[in-house]
């Protein structure tokens, strides 16, 4: 049996390349793996420039490294904002779908309550009829 796609699958399938790329970059930059790798690269960069035996390509205070960080931040911030905007859009879609599901469930519950009330009323009518028959038979 093949299951239909849910709202999240449909939303994901309709994403453009840029949106998927923004989500991937945000997921990557927001991970411990990225932080650890970047920390190791920075430590290696600084270590090689402080202890360099042949050539210091970025002497203290590591202006080239600061430039690289500024460039990374200049590109990372808007990409992460795009991913956050998409997450907000997904949250809105999910909230709307949850609301629709709750409304449908409420209607079903109300219909069930009406049916149960009808069944109870029918039972009470039958009991009343039986009691009336008993009273008539006792009087005779």
Image (cartoon, grey):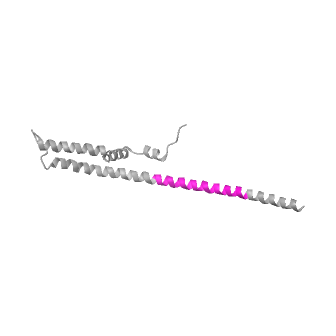
Foreground residue, 74 or 55? Answer: 55
The picture places residue 47, in percent across and down from the top left corner, at 15, 43
The picture places residue 118, in percent across and down from the top left corner, at 70, 57
Which residue is situated farthest in the left direction here? Answer: 54
The picture places residue 123, in percent across and down from the top left corner, at 74, 56
Characterize the magenta stretch by its predominant secondary structure.
helix
Residue for point 35% across, 44% down: 24
Foreground residue, 135 or 89? Answer: 135
Give the tally of numbered discs.
0
Whether the magenta-drawn stretch holds residue 111 is answered as yes
Residue for point 55% across, 56% down: 103
Which residue is situated farthest in the bottom direction here? Answer: 139
State which quarter of the image contains the N terminus: top right
Foreground residue, 139 or 13? Answer: 139
The reply, left or right, for residue 104 in relation to residue 51 is: right
Magenta stretch, residue numbers: 93-121
Which residue is situated farthest in the right direction here? Answer: 140
Foreground residue, 45 or 8? Answer: 45
Which residue is situated farthest in the front direction here? Answer: 138
Whether the magenta-drawn stretch holds residue 138 is answered as no
Q: Quadrant of residue 15?
A: top left
The reply, left or right, for residue 139 in relation to residue 8 is: right
Q: Quadrant of residue 117?
A: bottom right
Residue for point 15% across, 49% down: 63
State which quarter of the image contains the C terminus: bottom right
Residue for point 44% across, 54% down: 92
The reply, left or right, for residue 56 in relation to residue 92 is: left
The picture places residue 43, in percent across and down from the top left corner, at 19, 44
Relative to 5, residue 104 above or below = below
């Amino acid at each position: 049996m093949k299951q239909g796609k849910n709202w999240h699958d449909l939303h994901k399938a309709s994403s453009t390349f840029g949106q998927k790329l923004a989500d991937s970059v945000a997921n990557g930059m927001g991970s411990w793996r990225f932080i650890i790798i970047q920390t190791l690269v920075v430590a290696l960069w600084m270590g090689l420039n402080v202890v360099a035996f042949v050539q210091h390509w970025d002497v203290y205070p590591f202006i080239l490294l600061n430039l690289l960080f500024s460039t990374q931040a200049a590109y990372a911030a808007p990409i992460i904002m795009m991913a956050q905007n998409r997450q907000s859009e997904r949250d809105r879609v999910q909230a709307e779908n949850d609301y629709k599901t709750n409304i449908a469930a409420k209607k079903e519950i109300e219909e069930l309550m009406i049916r149960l009330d009808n069944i109870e009323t029918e039972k009470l009518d039958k009991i009343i009829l039986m009691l009336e028959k008993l009273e008539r038979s006792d009087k005779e």
